[in-house]
Amino acid sequence: MGTIEQILDPMPIPRMVKVKQTFERPRIENVAKTLESRIKAHPALTAIWPGMSIAVGVGSRGITDLPLLVRTTVDALKAAGAIPFIIPAMGSHGGATAEGQIAMLAGLGVSEKTMGVPVRATMDTVCLGESANGLPVYFDALAHEADGIVIINRIKPHVAFRGQFESGLMKMITIGLGKQKGAAMCHELGFGKMAENIPAIGRVSLSKENVLFAVGTLENPYHEICEITVLGKNEIEREEPGLLERAKTLLPRIYFDELDVLIIDEIGKNISGTGMDTNVVGRYHTPYCYGGPTITKMAVLDLTDVSHGNGTGIGIVDFTTKRVQDKFIPDQAYANCLTSTVVQSAKMPMVLGSDRLAIQAAVKTSNVLDKRKVRMMHLRNTLDMELVEVSENLLPEVRNHPMMEAVSDPYSWRFDETGVLLDTLI
């Protein structure tokens, strides 16, 4: 047994209890039908002429029903006589390469085979001019050459700053369609200026480019689509801030204000731009965001495969595993963080040889004298939060909370012979 194992082996892991969390659950039952009707009813459709080439911008997030949203939009454009094609609208993701961005879309179920239209990508941009606050405005060359542009994105609070426009439509126009060059320029002055830069740059792009309409979705805490809106280019700036406020009320959350230890099974770009929703865990990689619970120590056990090695966000936790380190591809994460200028996101935390050791390290360093009293929670990820686990000593709080219900008796975690935590969130 090595030194680290000798230090951590005596650390007790508290018995856990499965807990069902309940959240507000508005939802749309038939996503395709709803979106199709909204597109057909929008006046922008009348601007489409036969043979019109339309670039459909799709991002890198794990948006619910993304392939369905994209295919429905593409089919509606084809029915109107257009010739649509798909482009990645994702700034520096995918290692800031065209091939990497096409691979990211394919990993999310968006490919030429599944969508029935070509997927084209370039990192080339054109400069459209200068924003009111003096920044050059870059725009995807393929989108610029098309006769029209449509974008599809989810609207939600950002993980690094606060403003009228956070993650959503204006950001996709500014950063996603700005590609790496435009994303870098928008981030150049740091996240403290993002609330100003996004609309300033976005206004120029909207005034210069033929953006026909944008499809915006809101998701409930169960990762289900609950609102779909179709906005013309002149409606985006007016309507998106209200949709963002609504999205803030729909975030899943941790119902404990303070925890000593939080264990997260996985992070990834398909979950959040920072691997996890920082609004949920209350840990941020910039000083321009706030809110959420206070958590002393956090450990992440794995990185999603569809992230293609981009472990952005791992730097804001305290412990991780050799498994995550082995999956981590520096070029993927570094390109993202050099573009955003937030380098902490890609720093590697303390790496332990197994899930068990990472969990024990979090317990060991929680600054609780009696480790049997550690307040601990376990999530699969920050999107999948209906079923969680909490330490046995949190049961009184669970029983007194109207939105939580214990659904098991206390039990001890089991690990395989290599120290991997056996799946319990089922």
Image: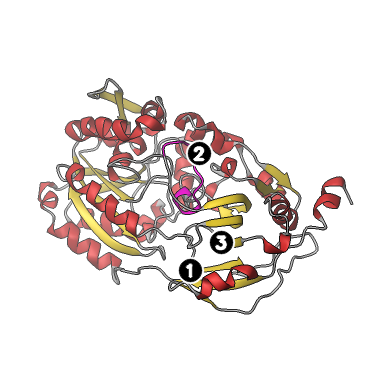
Q: Is residue 20 above or below residue 247?
A: below
Residue bounds of the magenta highlight: 278-288
Answer left or right for 392 relative to 143.
right
Q: Which residue is mark 1?
A: 386
Q: Element under label 2?
A: loop
Report if residue 232 is visible in the image.
yes
Front-most of residues 370 and 144: 370
Q: Is residue 350 magenta?
A: no
Q: Which residue is mark 3?
A: 380
The Cα–Cα distance between marks 3 and 2, rounded to whole angstroms, is 21 Å
The Cα–Cα distance between marks 1 and 3, rounded to whole angstroms, is 10 Å
Mark drawn on residue 109 = none
Q: Element under label 3?
A: loop
Is the C-beta separation of discs 3 and 2 under 8 Å? no
Q: Is residue 175 above or below residue 419?
A: above
Q: Quadrant of residue 380?
A: bottom right
- Residues packed near mark 1 inside 10 Å, few (<14), some (14 to 19) or many (20 plus): some
Residue 72: % across, % down: 28, 60
Give whichever of discs 3 and 2 has the lower sequence position: 2
Give whichever of discs 1 and 3 has the lower sequence position: 3
Q: Which residue is mark 2?
A: 285
Which SS type dominates the magenta stretch? loop
